[in-house]
Image: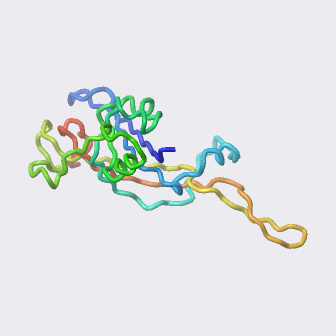
Amino acid sequence: KQEVKIIRSLILGEMERGQSQLQGLCFITRLHRNELIPSESMAKLRQKNARAVRMAEEQRAPQHLYMDVAVNYSKALPLSMHIHNICAEARDAIYTREADAKHWMEKGLDGSMFEILPQASEVTDVERCRLSADRWKPCVCHYSLCIEWYPCLLKYCKTRDDVGKISSYKCGIKSCHRCSQYDYYVPQKQLCLWDEEP
């Protein structure tokens, strides 16, 4: 109802480098109507061979998102009731975009759950974490992930009746693949150790 999409990533920490056992990230963006098929349609359309490993039929263009707003975990319930469960391991690492936050506030949500993060262009000493030598300095972290398979469109098949009239009907689910790249501010590079030069 709120047009919210939540992507969660859990990253195993490197204990020998002072990280916790598990680091969670949540990226919350506006869900546009054409991104996923309705859940009612998914419930009605059963896939044959449910255990089969499937390949996506459509490769969607990669997206690069600058997540310039932090979301307060304790105040996020009005945005989505799922945030408390999905983002529990990422309480201090929930991000969105300013444009999406403005959209939700225009729909009546309280803006106190959003905090605009420092921009790399505004703070001269903030650099990309990949280039930073100091683990305790703030930097702009980069994180990439791919969703290999998700239901994105309904498939329509055509049928011809006795008099030759052609009509279409829902006959399946089309799957898509998409990669996303997220950039966001972190108060110290220690929270972004995967973003290092190889």
- Colour theme: rainbow
Residue at 42 percent of width and 30 percent of height: 84
For the residue pair 127 and 86, the one nearer the viewer reads as: 86
**Is residue 85 shown left or right of residue 127?**
right
Q: Residue 182, percent across and down?
A: 32, 50
Q: Residue 168, percent across and down?
A: 74, 64
Residue at 12 percent of width and 39 percent of height: 137
Q: Quadrant of residue 179?
A: bottom left
**Is residue 139 shown left or right of residue 74?**
left
Residue farthest along the right direction in this orientation: 162
Q: Residue 5, percent across and down?
A: 45, 45
Residue at 57 percent of width and 50 percent of height: 151
**Is residue 150 shown left or right of residue 143?**
right
The mark tally for this picture is 0
Q: Quadrant of residue 91?
A: top left
Q: Residue 144, percent across and down?
A: 35, 49
Residue at 30 percent of width and 37 percent of height: 112
Considering only vertical position in the picture, is 170 above or below 2? Answer: below
Residue farthest along the left direction in this orientation: 125
